[in-house]
Image: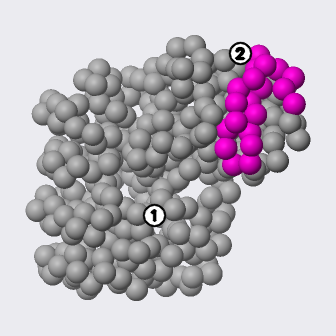
Amino acid sequence: MTLVIDNIGLLVTNDPEHGDGPLGVRRQVALVLDGDRVLAVEGAGALADERIDAEGRCVIPGFVDSHTHLVFAGDRSDEFVARMAGQPYQAGGILTTVAATRAASDGELTTALARRVAEARANGVTTFEVKSGYGLTVGDERRLLDVAGEVTPETTLLAAHVVPPEFAGRADDYVALLCGEMLDATADACRWVDAFCEHGAFDADQCRAVLGAAQQRGLGTRLHANQLRPGPGVQLAVEMGCASADHCTHLTDADIEALAGGSTVATFLPATDFSTRQPYPNARRVIDAGATVALATNCNPGSSYTSSMAFCIALAVRDLQMTIDEALVAATVGGAEALRRHDVGRLSAGCRADAVILDAPSYTHLVYRPGMQLVKTTIVAGRLT
């Protein structure tokens, strides 16, 4: 079954070989989809079994959100209100969500996740990663991964989120449990393993042990790095060959040099810096150094409760010193690179048929009209959602 999106005023393919400039822009064209794949970009009026009239609107690749915490229970709005009143963000607030999530049934978690996935789809997200990390026991981390695995193959074990209360004062014992019994019980349910390298969470040696144990089991790795202060996280991520170092709020020259010299993607989470009133990172320095960058929402109940990639793009342009084109690439191709995916984030032949029809003539409106719902239609693997 073929589907054509016809009368596209401006198409972003993200493939320079298929259009003008780095974004591979085409004008007045049709995008032909065959099942779950992109078949071709043709002239307006192309034929197919089914047709969608874009009516001159802009079409972009679906957003790739490479960092989310979508499986959780509970509410932390009071914590957000306190931060807005001047209280600093602290990693320990995660334990509030841990308690609520442990108490929730599988059905409650599944229902809540489905609602958040629907919100993400409505915001143009077609590929997303989902972390565990709010269970912190062998059984709870496994069930969070099982719930997440129902909606995405990009599941991440984040048992190294914070030290659970039953291991207070015994972080090394918890890391030993994670590296052994917990990974044995969850390795078949996740593609990735992550850790929070931060004061109040886990130090560099503990994170190195977690990442190493994951890699020994053939799992990919990523790392929460340099969120609250400068630290060893970014350079550890590069050293360990992690797919991404996420947050990157506090970067030294040495951190940027490491990112530029390795394959680790620097993933910025500007909605988190907005929500926690942290300083925004200077993405311009990282891009100019030659490193690959991504944007992600970090959707979670404590520090970034949003699934709006458009909001993140607007923040990146205004506060991270990125251009609009760079921000769009970071939210699509960059996210795909952070997930080591080559089939998403682009609209060229053979890629997965993930497209977003904007209710706007250009993708620049994502920044030009901040806060507006500009996603008209989201198409995932050739299907309207």
Task: Please say if the residues under marks 2 and 1 sit with CB atoms less than 8 Å apart.
Answer: no
One can see residue 57 in this view? no
Is 271 contained in the magenta span? no
Is 40 contained in the magenta span? yes
> Reading the chain from its start, which is encountered first: label 2 or label 1?
2
- Above or below 69: residue 180: below
Q: Which residue type carries mark 2?
A: Arg
Residue linked to disc 2? 27
Q: Which residue appears at 25% of the width and 77% of the height?
A: 178
Q: Which residue appears at 87% of the width and 31% of the height?
A: 47
- Above or below 58: residue 165: below
For label 2, the crowd category at 10 Å Cα-Cα, with few meaning under 14, some 14 to 19 and many 20 or more, is some
In this picture, which residue range is highlighted in magenta? 28-47
- Above or below 273: residue 144: below
One can see residue 340 in this view? yes
Q: Estimate the x, y position of residue 191 in percent, counting from the top left.
A: 41, 63
Q: Which is the main secondary structure of the residues drawn in magenta?
A: strand
Q: Which residue type carries mark 1?
A: Thr
Q: Which one is nearer the viewer's eye here, 98 or 266? A: 266
In-image side of 205 versus 224 (left or right): left
Picture quarter containing residue 20?
Answer: top right
Q: Estimate the x, y position of residue 14 in percent, counting from the top left.
A: 55, 27
Residue linked to disc 1? 155
As helix, strand or loop, the secondary structure at mark 1 comes to strand
